[in-house]
């Protein structure tokens, strides 16, 4: 099946498919001590197709950020437990929220106080009552731009996969989120890749890296983070897969990939794979275990999957 397929044709069809995947809904966290206010704001945003979560107790903000992972925070300024400025400062102190847009939405009309609030990390200040279309446009523009920026930072430019740092971040998030189901960490390393570069040249080597990236994307669940771990090394976080299930899937992918032809000189390439299922150890121990399994796959002759 794969031998007849023109790889380039397959790749362009895949790229089209990836372009067509709809943009995930925007998620907005509303922080306001007044339930009436937060409900009103939520209604406006929900009508425009945005997903909202409202909290009326500002002390819950960090927990909710973790669980809901919003694209943007709409923040009231005056709340009994803690004011919006203090809250913005606390959020900005967390490294993972440096790029999270925070917009103040408050009745405060004093220019100096508005600017002081923004100095604590707010990106904009909307004065209540705000016109619904103004609110929706401000929020969606901010979210779209911040997602574009996030994507540029998080992704490897050759393959579009997550880069090393963000792959490990996704691993951490997955382990925190999915404590009741198995999670496996997968390392993939192209076999004798130096020879591919030496024999066919680096542009062909780059094409092989891109082909494998797209092949992995196509054959794995959209919810499984895939990253370029290093040069010709890839890593996958397989959610809801134990070591055996992950190995079965990766072996099928390995087998199909080995039959692809990458250029007009009949170039074929294989990869080796190491898998470790999470058992409560540290991230570096988990990665180390997958790496050791990969090493065994290499030593045992390559083009195989080990757990
Ligand atoms: P093994 O089967 O043991 O993995 O052998 P190998 O040749 O694949 O491993 P080695 O680590 O010796 O070589 C990896 C090669 O990958 C060397 C490096 O030049 C190449 N490489 C790394 N990043 C890129 C890239 O972005 N593009 C290209 N074309 N080559 C790359
Ligand atoms: Mg208030
Ligand atoms: Mg390597
Ligand atoms: Mg290699």
Image: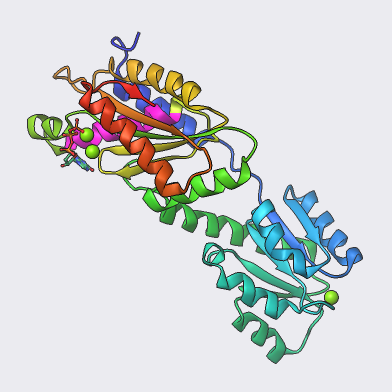
Image coordinates of residue 21 in percent, x first then y, are 55, 35
The residue closer to the viewer here, 245 or 39, is: 245
Q: Residue at x 52, y 29 (%)?
A: 221
Camera-side residue of 150 and 273 = 273
Residue 263 position, x and y percent, is: 19, 23
- The reply to whether residue 124 is in sight is no
User: Does residue 13 appear in the picture of this structure?
Assistant: yes
Q: Is residue 254 above or below residue 232?
A: above
Seen at 65% across and 74% down, the residue is: 88
Q: Quadrant of residue 259?
A: top left
Residue 227 figure quarter:
top left
Asked if 257 appears above or below 176 in the picture, the reply is above
Determine the residue located farthest toward the right in the rendered image. Answer: 36
Q: Main secondary structure of the magenta part?
A: helix
Expressed as whole percent of the image width and height from the top left, the position of residue 122 reads 63, 75
Image point 57% across, 32% down: which residue? 182
Q: Is residue 117 magenta?
A: no
Stretch in magenta: 203-217
In the displayed image of the protein, which residue is found farthest to the left?
199
**Image quadrant in which the C terminus is located:** top left
- Which quadrant does the N terminus fall into? top left
Question: Ligand 1 is in which quadrant of the figure?
Answer: top left
Looking at the image, residue 203 lies above or below residue 25: above
As drawn, 21 above or below 137? above
Tell me: 108 left or right of 188: right
* Residue 209 located within the stretch drawn in magenta: yes
User: Is residue 46 shown left or right of residue 69?
Assistant: right
Q: Closer to the camera, 250 or 156?
A: 250
Q: Position of residue 250 (x, y in %)?
A: 40, 23
Q: Left or right: 120 with respect to 294?
A: right
């Amino acid at each position: 099946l794969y031998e007849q397929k023109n790889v380039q044709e397959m790749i362009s069809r895949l790229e089209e498919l990836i372009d067509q995947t709809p943009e995930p809904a925007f998620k907005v966290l509303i922080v306001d001590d007044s339930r009436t206010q937060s409900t009103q704001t939520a209604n406006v945003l929900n009508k425009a197709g945005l997903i909202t979560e409202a909290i009326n107790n500002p002390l819950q903000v960090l927990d909710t950020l973790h669980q809901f992972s919003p694209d943007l925070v709409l923040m009231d300024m005056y709340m009994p437990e803690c004011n919006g400025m203090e809250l913005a400062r606390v959020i900005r102190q967390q490294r993972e929220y440096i790029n999270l847009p925070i917009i103040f939405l408050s009745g405060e009309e004093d220019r100096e106080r508005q600017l002081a609030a923004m100095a604590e990390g707010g990106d904009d200040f909307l004065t209540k009552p705000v016109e619904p279309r103004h609110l929706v446009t401000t929020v969606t523009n901010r979210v779209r731009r911040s997602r574009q920026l996030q994507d540029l930072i998080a992704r490897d430019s050759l393959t579009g996969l997550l880069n090393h740092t963000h792959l490990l971040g996704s691993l951490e998030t997955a382990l925190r989120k999915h404590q009741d189901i198995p999670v496996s960490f997968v390392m993939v390393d192209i076999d004798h890749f130096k020879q591919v570069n030496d024999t066919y040249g680096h542009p062909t080597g780059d094409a092989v890296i891109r082909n494998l990236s797209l092949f992995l994307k196509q054959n794995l669940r959209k919810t499984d983070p895939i990253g370029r771990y290093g040069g010709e090394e890839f890593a996958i976080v397989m959610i809801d897969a134990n070591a055996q299930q992950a190995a079965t899937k990766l072996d099928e992918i390995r087998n199909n990939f080995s039959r692809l032809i990458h250029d007009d000189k009949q170039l074929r390439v294989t990869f080796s794979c190491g898998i470790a299922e999470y058992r409560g150890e540290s991230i570096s121990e988990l990665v180390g275990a997958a790496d050791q399994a990969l090493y065994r796959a290499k030593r045992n002759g390559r083009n195989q999957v080990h757990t």
